[in-house]
Image: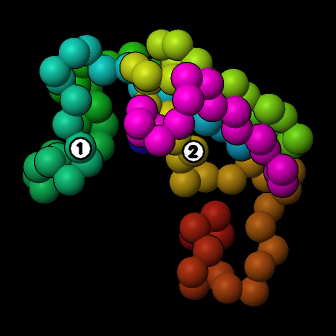
Amino acid sequence: HIDTHSAFEDEIFSLSLAGPCIMEFRRYQEGSWQSDSMMGKDMNEEDHESSLNFLRRAVYLPPRSLILLSGEARYAWLHYIPHHKVRRGPCCCTYVQYCDSQR
């Protein structure tokens, strides 16, 4: 997402309180952005991403880190935290049938 321009000032701070994470940034060429809901059902994610015109950068955020988004990073780059966890070992939860890391 890109944080709405009208609700916030020019700088946005984000504080990581818990564990580490990887925040991904995407910068689409002007006019080429498409939402995930527009992705065709026959097209897998890799094909979809290679057909779009964007730059992607991943930033590792350690625990208790602070990131500042301003300027182009604030207004032109989408940012999100992908659905994955940075683990220090294997998952040991008791919900094996639901756990994405134990499959």
Q: Position of residue 101 (x, y in %)?
A: 64, 64
Q: Quadrant of residue 11?
A: top right
Q: Name the amino acid type tagged 2.
A: Ile
> Is 81 situated left or right of 94 in this image?
left
Residue pictured at 53% horizontal, 36% vertical: 8
> Is 32 situated left or right of 14 in this image?
left
Q: Earlier in the sequence, mark 1 or mark 2?
A: 1
Find disc 1 in the rendering and name its residue.
Answer: 35
* 96 to 27, vertically: above or below: below
Q: Marks 1 and 2, Cα distance to the nearest angstrom? A: 16 Å
Q: Residues within 10 Å of mark 2 (few under 14, many from 20)?
A: some
Which labelled disc corresponds to residue 81?
2
Magenta extent: 2-20
> Is 25 situated left or right of 30 in this image?
right
Quadrant in which the C terminus appears: bottom right
Q: Position of residue 4 (x, y in %)?
A: 42, 39
Q: Position of residue 61 (x, y in %)?
A: 76, 34
Q: Look at the image and say whether residue 16 sits in the magenta stretch.
A: yes
Residues 95 and 3: in front is 3
Q: Residue 30: tell me if it is visible.
A: yes
